[in-house]
Amino acid sequence: MTERIKSVVIVGGGTAGWMTAAALSRYLPSDSTKITLIESEDIGTVGVGEATIPQIATFNRMLSIDEREFVRATKATFKLGIEFRDWGEKGDHYFHPFGTYGWDLEGTEFHHFWRRAQMAGDDTPIDAYCLNAAVASAGRFALPDGNPRSPLSKLAYAYHFDALLYAKFLRRYAEARGVERWEGCVQSVKQDSKTGFVGQLGLDDGREISGELFIDCTGFVGLLIEKTLGAGYDDWTDMLPMDRAVAVPCARVEPPKPYTIATADEAGWRWRIPLQHRTGNGHVYSSSYTDDEKALQSLLENLDGEPLADPRQLRFTTGIRRKFWDKNVVAIGLSGGFLEPLESTSIHMIQTAIAKLLALYPDRDWSEVDRDEYNRLLKVTFTHIRDFIVLHYVATDRKDTAFWRDRQHVPVSETLQRKMDLLQGAGRFFRYEDELFSVTSWLAVMQGQGRAPQRYNPMADSLSDMNLSRSLADMRKVIDQTTASLPTHDDFLQRFMASAPAGAHA
């Protein structure tokens, strides 16, 4: 008979800790499982990740969270994609949309027909066939329509929100479901002398807490996974040399745009994220190519409004733990690994780690096979996202600074090179195991940075020129009409907020 784990201890709060606590409190039997979270008000959280991808809505639905309540509590706005500025060459801009480009025709992916038309002299940009891109450009928004025949069924969205408020929101959710929070700092860790498993934590006030499964959400410190168990770390700085960031919020000066902006800088890039109450700003950069003072100056000079707080400096090493799960400790969040938030994947990786833990949740037998599979799946997911981020740096013609010139010589994985060659050759794309980003994402970056497919799949010749022209025109008409019918993002948000429940609890 399976022996259940009866006590789970989460070390660290913040987004990772409270997302984990909320999910476990929702799915573990409350009558037989004790969940405890230890955090200290004296230890700050990173708390600058505010942009997400559409999968976050799945996580909230898993917890049966009311969307209106969530938007109200976290000061959220809606997000249709990311606008990239100055990435291919200075002065360029392109949009990476959620959702898809066009509609497949004759069993062949749409972008092959678009490329066929381009090669015949049609210079209509691919964004003209993307509802997300059109709606974002117009500053409009609506929720998707569940009717698959509706053009709005093609709309996909995520959120911008205040990560610290999200953690507080989930704390209320978790504590309402029995999670016990202990205030304090961990000063000592006791391990079993035979197995090396963590058994007990000693706090700074002398209290001790025992557990069976320990979740490490202590951020870059990796208190349990690294400082205690020595799981090891694979450094990916050779591919992604950014090692610092500075962040500062500023006052809003315009209605919030329904998308994130990522602007390439001399030695990295800057983000701009619109929330209801402020705009989040940051600069991710490599200290090998610029210094902290210059990076901060670049950030402050490009703010839309007055700064609302002192800048926060962060230092990090891009990479992953060699083991995300070692013995009876699972690392979730920054304690497991870090990738710069260029594609807003930080919170998604927390969500992924939680989902994999639920799927491979242990019992007291502590299956090595399950543990190995968890580690394999997380490594695969991190590696695919890493490759997609690297793509932004190597698919560029910028040579105006040493940083960008050196991006031409970045080592790329065999998988990344193969995907680039296939897509740039004839628009061919294959999604590998557990891969997050679809052909829409890869095509957006490749063609947006001057690496559009040189040819197309000959299967796209199945339509006559007349039928192809008519089909493309019909798609553009539907997208234009749908976009024009929608309210502005700000108007939609105000109406959405007005109908939200007054309470901010789950």
Image (tube, helix red, strand yellow):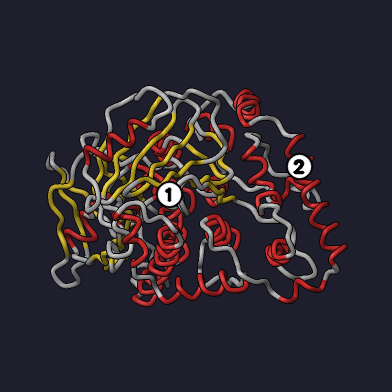
Q: Secondary structure at mark 1?
A: helix
Q: Which residue is mark 2?
A: 480
Q: Nearer the viewer, residue 362 or 139?
A: 139
**At 27% across and 50% down in the image, what residue appears?**
219
Q: Of circles 1 and 2, which is in front? A: 2
**At 71% across and 63% down in the image, what residue appears?**
110
Q: Nearer the viewer, residue 371 or 166?
A: 166
The vertical placement of 425 against 150, above or below, is below
Q: Residue 488 location, x and y as percent?
A: 66, 30
The vertical placement of 277 against 57, above or below, is above
Of callouts 1 and 2, the N-terminal one: 1
Q: Quadrant of the N terminus?
A: bottom left
**At 48% across and 49% down in the image, what residue appears?**
26
Q: Residue 251 location, x and y as percent?
A: 42, 23
Q: Which residue is mark 1?
A: 347
Q: Amino acid at mark 1?
A: Ile
